[in-house]
Amino acid sequence: MKRLKNKRMLLALAAVLFLVVVLAGIGKLPYVDRLKCVGCGACERVCPVDTIELIDGKARIGEACISCNSCVKTCPYNAIKSPN
Ligand code: SF4
Ligand code: SF4
């Protein structure tokens, strides 16, 4: 019984931490410099939430972004900027 309670508390804590991370990222999404983007797709492949699309040969970041900055670090053309 006590073990189950601890497990529930850990799950609740994990959920709260996840929400804090997501909420902290709202309004701080990276953005694509369309002049620099060559549409190589490297950012699309690295995004953990699959929210980058290539549209007309340019990357576009979707609303599901969690601001992990993986795409910013990955872009070989320095075409994605972090707002921070
Ligand atoms: S990695 Fe950079 S150059 Fe390649 S598609 Fe993404 S933003 Fe464009
Ligand atoms: S910051 Fe992370 S979640 Fe947001 S678009 Fe880039 S790789 Fe995807």
Image (cartoon, grey):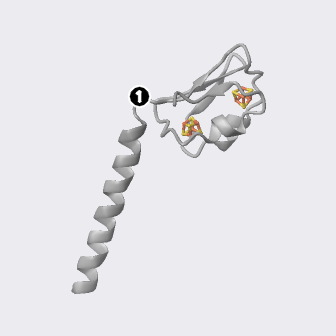
Q: Is residue 65 left or right of residue 40?
A: left
Please say if 3 is above or below 74: below
What residue is rendered at 65% in x and 27% in y? 80
Please say if 19 is above or below 74: below
The one nearer the camera, 71 or 44, is 71
Total numbered badges shown on the rendered structure: 1
Please say if 72 is above or below 4: above
Q: Which residue is mark 1?
A: 27
| Spot occupied by residue 4 in the image (x, y as percentages of width and height) | 26, 80
Q: Dot 1 surroundings within 10 Å: few (below 14), some, or many (20 or more)?
A: few
> Extreme front residue here?
84
| Spot occupied by residue 53 in the image (x, y as percentages of width and height) | 62, 28
What residue is rendered at 68% in x and 35% in y? 43
What residue is rendered at 22% in x and 85% in y? 2
| Spot occupied by residue 72 in the image (x, y as percentages of width and height) | 64, 35
Mark 1 element type: loop
Beta carbon of the mark 1 residue lies under 8 A of ligand 2: no
* Quadrant of the snapshot with the N terminus: bottom left
> Extreme top residue here?
35
| Spot occupied by residue 14 in the image (x, y as percentages of width and height) | 36, 61
What residue is rendered at 55% in x and 35% in y? 51
The one nearer the camera, 18 or 44, is 18
Instruction: Name the image quarter holding residue 6.
Output: bottom left
Identify residue type, mark 1: Gly
Give ligand 2's quarter of the image: top right
